[in-house]
Amino acid sequence: MNSYQDVDELVARMKEQGKSKTEIIIAAAEAELGWPYVWGAVGAQCTPDKRQYYANRSSCPAAEAALTIKKCQALNGSGKACGGCEYYPGNRRTLIDDCQGFVKQVCSRVGISFSGGGATSMWNGANWTEKGTRATLPENKLCCIFWQASDGKTMNHIGFYYGGQMTHCSGTVKREALSSRVTHWAIPKGLDGTVPTDRPTLRIGSSGDYVVECQNDLLKLGYDLSPYGADGKYGKRTAAQVQRFQEDYDVKPYDGICGRRTWEALDAAIAGGGTTFYTVTIPHVNKAQADALKAQYPAATVSEEGD
């Protein structure tokens, strides 16, 4: 999981590279996968004090307040302070949002702001250049998606939609298939274009068809993704095999993240049939030599010769 500093640095790099607002929003949203949900929060640092603050607000529903406390080890008594918490990766903080807070926080990174304190008032405000019902949901544009309550007026939830999937904050920030509950969509003012046709950058926490494509490429090239195979989830095993591929094909940095250069290298490797690898057998070495070779080549196997 990334810290908020990691996402800040990612956004800064993308701005230096001249990336579009659409590209930055998508990258930032996906870099925040796994970040925690807290009712009423908009981009606050995840600390025990901040969680307690939001839980104590008079407007916070009792069930949401209880969940906010339950999800914090420093407040529920299961741990001391934040060390070891999943929301404190590498001793660096994540941010807390609810659904509308997540959309606002991500869009604020490119200077897009919204009127309204919740999904309903955001929908009703002058925040959009286009809007419509699910039947007209655009497939090639980044937009916000809503689901409407049975009263036909209240919006219960908001998130992002692009590339055939939605990214939203519900329990945690997650990316998944478009929910059947989505009823409406809208494009924020200030957004600058369609979703790039380039395949997205994949990292731990990514999921979906592009992950399956990456995993299938790795499997075709002989990389081991057992026991899960091409399951569409970019976990530690997939990241480790992407890093091995990067090292084998000299795609720097060797970071286990499947970005543009790694995608291009995968395409080239598949088209070229992959790199040919060789097994070298060296007979009649003594134990010291065998140990030295094993230390230099950890994947090597050493067996004792028979009489």
Image: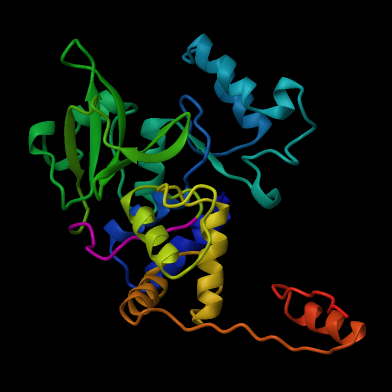
Q: Report whether 233 appears left or right of 22.
A: right
Give the dominant element type of the magenta stretch: helix, strand or loop.
loop
Q: Residue at x 84, y 82 (%)?
A: 290
Q: Residue at x 70, y 86 (%)?
A: 281
Q: Nearer the viewer, residue 237 or 60?
A: 237
Q: Confirm whether residue 53 shows in the render.
A: yes
Depicted 238 relative to depicted 147: above or below: below
Depicted 62 relative to depicted 289: above or below: above
Q: Confirm whether residue 110 shows in the render.
A: no
Q: Nearer the viewer, residue 117 or 1?
A: 1
Q: Report whether 3 appears left or right of 219.
A: right
Percent x, y of residue 180: 23, 27
Question: What range of the chain is rendered magenta?
Answer: 194-203
Percent x, y of residue 112: 30, 49
Depicted 24 relative to depicted 146: above or below: below
Q: Residue at x 56, y 73 (%)?
A: 254
Percent x, y of residue 136: 8, 38
Please identify the quarter of the rendering in which residue 74 is found: top right
Magenta stretch contains residue 221:
no
**In the rendered view, how is the structure colored?**
rainbow
Please identify the quarter of the rendering in which residue 291 is found: bottom right
Depicted 265 relative to depicted 71: above or below: below
Quadrant of the drawing holding the C terminus: bottom right
Q: Nearer the viewer, residue 195 or 9?
A: 195
Q: Nearer the viewer, residue 90 or 106?
A: 90
Q: Report whether 62 appears left or right of 182.
A: right
Magenta stretch contains residue 195:
yes
